[in-house]
Amino acid sequence: MIRKFFNYVIPAVIGMLVTSLYIVVDGMFVGKGVGSNALAAVNIAFPPNLIATALALIISVGGSTLVAMNLGAGKNEDAIDKFNESILFLIIVAIVLLIVGVFFSKPIAYALGAPDSLIEDVYNYIKFCFIFSVPLVLSEGLNCFLRNDGAPKLAMYAMISGSLTNILLDYIFIFIFKWGVIGAAIATGLGELVSMTIAIIYFLSGKGILRFKKCKISFKSIKDITIIGFPAFLTECTIAVVTMAFNMVILKRIGETGAATYSIINYTLTVINMIFVGIAQGMQPLLSFYYGAKEEDKVKYYYSLSIKSVLAAAFVNYFVFLLFGKRIISFFTNDMDLINVTYNALKIFSLGTFFAGINVIESAYFQSIKMCKISTAICVFRGFMATQISLFILPGLIGDNGIWLSNLGGELLVFLVVMASQKKYERRDWCHPLDK
């Protein structure tokens, strides 16, 4: 059983690690090739990208969960129908995002609180990222379905290919063509295009169970997919909302230097956050399949392994930051004052990763076994309340360090609420719906 777990989790984690690598390298190239102000601009512009990814996830995770459950129950044709309805839904959403991103990028940039000195870079980054809405949405969605069709390694290869393409084009567009943040956005979009193409070729080849076919999407299918995928949507949205909350407080209290510090912290934490997501994504097909097959013991076993995995990853990550934090930060900037300030902030901020990993797995666990209300509640509290409460209280009590401590405060609040709620559900037998 443990081998099967790692057969799914390791490719998902490797794929997410490579994705995190291109995000981090993107930040390095922007920081070194354009400057710290551009780095701050990209961080301010990032929430719309996260929301686009969130919309892709609500469909792909919801659809792939239904696909896995149908496959587990032996209903292959139903699984194929859900797959095609989900793809059609993804295409519709991608077209809407393309229109919104291209024509409303400047109002979005102002709404994100971008100062006049950064506004041009912010709206250009948003605009050129959203030009590639279709590959962005479809690459995310199709990779979910690859894992649920028994091809987790191909999903990994697709992500790796897209990431390497992005890294190569980042260097060319930023350092050779001197396109600045526009070059970074175009490189990201073309990387997603490569990843999407690999997945499309697989589904056209007929190698797995899932395949493309003509379909119509009903309101009921949209509703079912959305309900199950909504917690995944909220998980991504929470990152966007939390990022905006931090940016607003930081710009008000510290200014553009603080925004650059926060941007570097976000880039350095990308790796561990992607590991958490990779473990959750690798866990999902197993939990959903065995839920469909009504094998509750296996569901609990794989859930427990996932919790242990994220905790181990969080411990390793924190000690790496303690030992090599300044060296890592120096990849983004040559400013020694900024390096020292960021290192001190990073040591405080990254304490929250210990609880963040557990919170991500808890939400994904409940989602995978169709307990969507609990998963949604966790996401809502995590993204729209807990961190904001910490940001409201801690900076006023202990100064600017309270900003960086707010990540720990928010994740700890979520963890405590989840643990209390879980005991409540266990007493009422709500945590074990497989026999119902």
Image (spheres, helix red, strand yellow):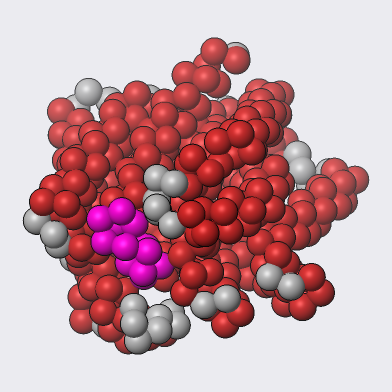
Residue 359: percent from left, percent from top: 67, 48
Q: In the orientation shown, which residue stands out farthest toward the left? A: 177
Residue at horizontal 21%, vertical 81%?
103
User: In this rendering, does residue 197 appear at all?
Assistant: yes
Residue at horizontal 53%, vertical 69%?
258
Residue at horizontal 42%, vertical 38%?
16
Is residue 189 positioned above or below 20 on the image? Answer: below
Choose top left, top right, bottom left or bottom right for residue 44: bottom left
- Viewed as shown, does residue 429 lie left or right of 47? right
Q: Quadrant of the C terminus?
A: top right
- Viewed as shown, does residue 416 lie left or right of 374? right
Choose top left, top right, bottom left or bottom right for residue 309: top right
User: In this rendering, does residue 191 appear at all?
Assistant: no
Please identify the dominant SS of the magenta region. Answer: helix
- Residue 351: in magenta span: no
Task: Give, as a single range, the part of the protein colored magenta.
Answer: 30-42
Residue 209: percent from left, percent from top: 30, 28
Residue at horizontal 48%, vertical 54%?
336
